[in-house]
Image (cartoon, helix red, strand yellow):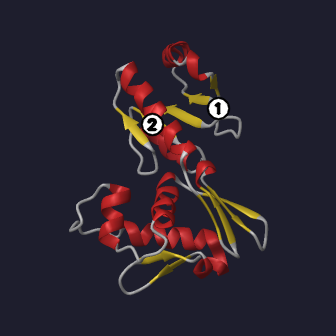
Amino acid sequence: MIGIITKNCMYQKLLTDALKPYNPILIEAPSSQTDLLILEGSQKETEDFFKTDPNQPVILLGSHHDDADIELSLPCQLTELFQCIDRLIDQMKHAPSFENNFFLFQGQHRQLLNKKTNEVIHLTEKENNLIIYLVKNQDKIISKDELLTAVWNYRPDTETHTVESHIYTLRQKLGENANQFIQNTSTGYTIVS
């Protein structure tokens, strides 16, 4: 089910009518009832929305945020929106799961379960994609440049601390057992199996 978040009455009507095959519902905030969110709003509304740390994929209409799965400019073609929805649904179906002694990763739900404390850790889209890439390549150490290319679509020689910042934030969420899930070496990062 797709959740639509917009305060614009015109977009509410247009999106709910156009997306009928996907069973859309209008919602005020992220909800566990929905598999995917479509958000339309101002840049400030977008910033406020992502502070709620949604655990569903998000298609952002008309604004920008680094944690959005997909961003579309307005006005957009409905066929383009449908393709984006279908692509995200397909990605969710094929998102891997991974388990070790300390954590259970459920890529489809964008969450980690700390098996020692039973705490559910919600992941941003980029954190989820980072872990998916590491899980799919769990037998090797992945360099920062490879992650920049694979997860962020940056050129490998881009001067940025994006990877380090996301790893740091992820480690903060994981708490004292962070080294039992993701490790960094002098050459890159790996998942602890």
Which of the two discs, 1 and 2, labels the residue nearer the N terminus? 1
Disc 1 or disc 2, which is closer to the eye? Answer: 2
Compared to residue 99, the image places residue 128 above or below, namely: above
Q: Nearer the viewer, residue 136 or 56?
A: 136
Mark 1 and mark 2: Cα distance apart in space:
24 Å
Q: Nearer the viewer, residue 185 or 167?
A: 185
Q: Residues within 10 Å of mark 2 (few under 14, many from 20)?
A: few
> Where is residue 119 shown, x and y percent of the image?
75, 64
Residue tagged by mark 2? 87
> Where is residue 147 shown, x and y percent of the image?
36, 65
Left or right of residue 40, residue 173 in this image? right
> Where is residue 67 shown, x and y percent of the image?
46, 50
The outermost residue toward the right is 117
Residue 142 image-quadrant placement: bottom left
Q: Secondary structure at mark 2?
A: helix
Residue at the spot x=61%, y=68% of the render? 173
Residue tagged by mark 1? 28
Image quarter (top left, top right, bottom left or bottom right) of the C terminus: bottom right
> Where is residue 111 shown, x and y percent of the image?
63, 56
Residue 71 image-quadrant placement: top left
Q: Residues within 10 Å of mark 1 (few under 14, many from 20)?
A: few
Q: Secondary structure at mark 1?
A: loop
- Please name the amino acid that badge 1 sits on: Glu
The outermost residue toward the bottom is 186
- Please name the amino acid that badge 2 sits on: Arg
Residue at the spot x=57%, y=30% of the render? 5
Residue 145 image-quadrant placement: bottom left
Residue at the spot x=41%, y=40% of the render? 70
